Image (spheres, rainbow, N blue to C red):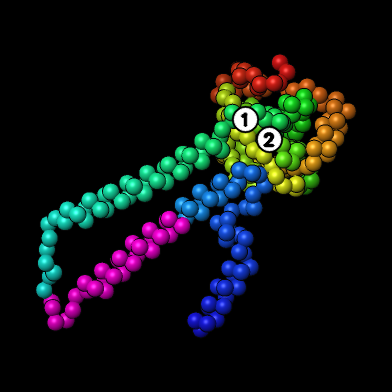
Amino acid sequence: MRAVLGALVLLALSSCSGTLSRGFLPEGATTETDRVTRLWNGSWITALAVGALVWGLIIWCVVRYRQREDDPGLPEQLRYNLPMEILYTVVPLLMVGVLFFYTARDEAALTDTSKTPQNVVNVVGKRWAWDFNYVTANTYETSTQVNTAGAEVGKLPTMYLPVNRRTEFVLTARDVIHSFWVPAFLQKMDMIPGRVNKFQVVPDRIGTFTGKCAELCGAYHSEMLFQVKVVSQQDFDARMADLRAKGQDGQLDNTLNPSPLAPGESEKIPTVAGSAS
């Protein structure tokens, strides 16, 4: 029986070795995903090691100090064990400190926007669809409430990105809080009305990737889907030319939709750098 179980485990591990090596995260599609995967795997390895140590000590104490028939009395009672108390206070603090250090370091790197992007896209979230302002190309793509009538995946709004080019996402919202999430990028960021959030990626793999809103935003939140197509620079330029040919040049206004809490009122968010006024 043990031999069979062992064979099954080995088979499972061999069949998903790539998935296991990245901690069962989606296969990354940007140059930043390796950093996320390393932090994720390191955190899990540390957690598993601590869990094994704790459970090992518990089991050892249960076996070693179990009550025996020939010794019905209570074990020696100790009021304090100062070295032990210092140990289980200092060690967790050190562990939390190390985890905080690596998390803060990687978060700072992933949200760094000091490098000059080669492509800027203003992604606008709205209930329950997306607008894409291609700031660098001075074109735009827009959509209406998506997939609420069973739209096919091919009908979803699609954002195009050039491969191996640094893209900066400028994230804004028209109504409530949304969240821009492309699982293959291993990054997501909230889109908050009246505020501009940014992050950069370098897509390094041509393909089509799914995207979605990751913040509960109303009745059709689960249908707020989109696609990202990472293509060659030539195909990207051709797509931008198609949008211009359709008359979709310039930039969509970033005015907030009227608030449901204050009918008729709207406000302006900060102007997106590089966009038309």
Residue closest to the eye, 147 or 7: 7
Q: Which residue is mark 2?
A: 166
Q: Which mark is residue 115?
A: 1
Residue at x-position 30% and y-position 65%: 57
Residue 46 at x, y percent in the picture: 43, 55
Q: Amino acid type of disc 2?
A: Arg
At 32% from the left edge and 50% from the top edge, which residue is drawn? 92
The total of numbered circles placed on residues is 2
Location of residue 18 (image quadrant): bottom right
**What's the magenta bit mostly, secondary-structure-wise?**
helix
**Which residue type does callout 1 highlight?**
Lys
**Is disc 2 surrounded by few (<14), some (14 to 19) or many (20+) residues within 10 Å?**
many
- Is residue 130 visible in the rendered image? The answer is yes
Asked where in the image residue 187 lies, by quadrant, the reply is top right
Q: Position of residue 216 (x, y in %)?
A: 57, 39
The mark that comes first in sequence, 1 or 2, is 1
Tell me the distance, in whole angstroms, between the alpha carbons under discs 1 and 2: 9 Å
Disc 1 crowd rating (10 Å Cα; few below 14, some 14-19, many 20+) is few
Instruction: Determine if residue 213 is in view.
Output: no
Does residue 159 show up magenta in the picture? no
Task: Decide whether residue 68 is among the magenta residues.
Answer: yes
Q: Is residue 38 left or right of residue 68?
A: right
As helix, strand or loop, the secondary structure at mark 2 comes to: loop
* Residue sitting at x 21%, y 72%: 65
Q: Is residue 191 above or below residue 254?
A: below
Helix, strand or loop under label 1: loop
- The residue segment tinted magenta is 45-72
> Is residue 64 placed above or below 35 in the rendered structure?
below
Q: Are marks 1 and 2 in contact (CB under 8 Å)?
A: yes
